[in-house]
């Protein structure tokens, strides 16, 4: 088995491309498998691209059996909470079938190390804050349920079939590579930070606030924004942990600090120097009010702790979006 080849499924996307960059900088040889449905050919800069769809079993089996990578990092999936309430079947197909295909193909090829992109959306409406990994997983939207089902399949493969997996439950990925090579680029864009920056840049008229009547300090939702480079670093550590024989685990990745939608808007105003027009709108279906990570396990198991804060996130995102024309 090639010792430094890492198959990155979904490596042409936002978090996947930043992870390929840090994997390459850490001496690994990332190979991206992506159907480019939401990714970008120009983001694949740190190794080859295999164009394929993970829901096509033959395609992913061929890639895994040909490469026999030291580990697989599986990012590919549909990601938007709101959209998942409109087209849930597509989400189950992509996120659950895709993951089952990865598990089956890995088993066939004898690859036993897997890092999986999960989410704090699997916790639903948490009873305790910050949210630790012991919190009950009761997702409140189809997206979160697809990720929980994928997690369950992975855990069973670990318990009964010799797989070893690190399941990473990210909170809200944000920010961009500081050198401006890659960043957040989703079409259509639905995420709060890029949309807010678009308003600051005059590319959109106003920021829509989805719900101002939550039981939070200013009535808007609270999220834990974690820099994409910190997330990428955690993936490199998870790969190293598995290749080094470490045990399976499920690990939160967040900063432990919550930011409300209005606080985020104020941070963008401060960085951009522009006042943002806002419009209040009803709550978006599927949104929990507050998601903030307890991240002690990431520190203990992976030696990970976030390096970047909200200012770095907003500055790097602003720089990326200002320089781009999409
Ligand atoms: N962005 C966040 O804040 C966040 C938070 C928690 C979890 N996650 C999870 O992290 C992962 C990556 O998120 P992202 O923001 O980088 O999303 P992204 O859409 O930028 O990246 C996903 C990549 O997967 C590819 N892809 C999708 N379906 C595919 C398929 N069937 N076959 C092959 N490739 C396919 C897309 O083309 C894209 O390049 C996702 O699984 C997402 O659910 C993201
Ligand atoms: O125009 C907008 C866009 C978003 N929001 C709010 O901003 C918050 C963050 O929304 P968004 O940026 O869309 O992220 P999430 O819906 O929290 O979802 C992201 O973060 C999740 C973890 O919380 C991941 O699982 C998902 O894949 C990822 O898309 C939510 O309260 C939204 O209601 C607005 O008020 N106005």
Image (cartoon, rainbow, N blue to C red):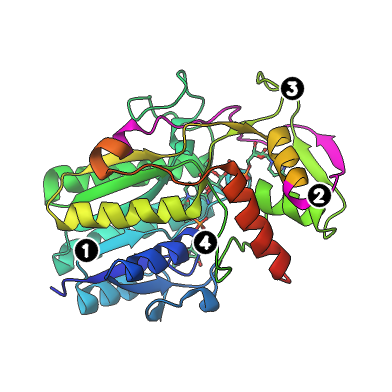
Rendered image: mark on residue 273: 2
- Per the rendering, the mark at residue 106 is 1
| Element at label 1 | helix
Q: Is residue 28 above or below residue 280?
A: below
Q: Is residue 23 above or below residue 212?
A: below
Provide the residue span drawn in magenta.
271-298
The residue at which mark 3 appears reads as 213
CA neighbours of label 1 inside 10 A, class few (<14), some (14 to 19), many (20+): many
Vertical position of residue 180 compared to residue 157: above or below: below
| Quadrant, the C terminus | bottom right
Residue positioned 23% across, 77% down in the render: 67
**Count of numbered circles in the view:** 4
Is tag 4's residue or tag 2's residue first in the polypeptide sequence?
4
Q: Earlier in the sequence, mark 4 or mark 1?
A: 4
Discs 3, 1 touching: Cβ within 8 Å: no
Give percent across and percent down for residue 267.
70, 41
Kindly report the distance in space between the C-alpha atoms of the residues bearing marks 4 and 2: 26 Å
C-alpha distance separating marks 4 and 1 = 24 Å
User: Is residue 31 depicted above or below 120 in this figure?
Assistant: below
The circle drawn on residue 14 is 4
Q: In the image, is 74 to the left or to the right of 112?
A: right
Element at label 2:
loop
Q: Are marks 3 and 2 in contact (CB under 8 Å)?
A: no
* Residue found 29% across the figure and 76% down from its top: 63
- Residue 57 seen in the current view: no
Q: Does the magenta portion include 281?
A: yes
- Counting from the top left corner in percent of width and height, residue 170 is at 44, 44
């Amino acid at each position: 088995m090639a010792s430094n080849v890492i198959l990155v499924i979904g490596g042409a996307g936002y978090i996947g491309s930043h992870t390929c960059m840090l994997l390459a900088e850490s001496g690994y040889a990332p190979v991206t498998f992506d159907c480019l449905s939401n990714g970008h050919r120009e983001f694949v800069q740190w190794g080859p691209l295999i164009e394929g769809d993970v829901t096509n079993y033959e395609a992913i089996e061929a890639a895994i059996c040909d490469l026999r990578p030291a580990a697989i990092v599986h990012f590919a999936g549909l990601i938007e909470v709101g959209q998942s309430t409109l087209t849930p079947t597509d989400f189950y197909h992509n996120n659950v079938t895709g993951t089952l295909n990865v598990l089956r193909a890995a088993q066939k090829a004898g690859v036993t190390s897997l890092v999986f992109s999960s989410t704090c959306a699997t916790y639903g409406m948490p009873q305790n804050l910050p949210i630790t990994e012991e919190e009950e997983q009761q997702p409140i939207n189809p997206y979160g349920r697809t990720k929980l089902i994928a997690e369950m399949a992975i855990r069973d493969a670990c318990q009964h079939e010799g797989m070893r997996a690190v399941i990473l439950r990210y909170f809200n990925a944000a920010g961009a590579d500081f050198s401006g090579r890659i960043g957040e680029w989703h079409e259509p864009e639905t995420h709060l930070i890029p949309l807010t920056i678009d308003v600051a840049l005059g590319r959109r008229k106003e920021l829509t606030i989805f719900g101002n009547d939550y039981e939070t300090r200013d009535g808007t939702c609270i999220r834990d924004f974690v820099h994409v480079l910190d997330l990428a670093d955690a993936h490199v550590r998870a790969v190293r942990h598995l290749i080094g024989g470490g045990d399976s685990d499920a690990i939160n990745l967040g900063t432990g600090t919550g930011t409300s939608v209005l606080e985020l808007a104020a941070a963008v105003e401060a960085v951009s120097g522009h006042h943002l027009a806002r419009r209040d709108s009803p709550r978006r279906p599927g949104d929990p009010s507050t998601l903030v990570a307890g991240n002690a396990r990431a520190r203990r198991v992976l030696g990970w702790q976030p390096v970047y804060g909200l200012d770095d996130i907003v500055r790097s995102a602003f720089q990326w979006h200002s320089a781009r024309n999409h």
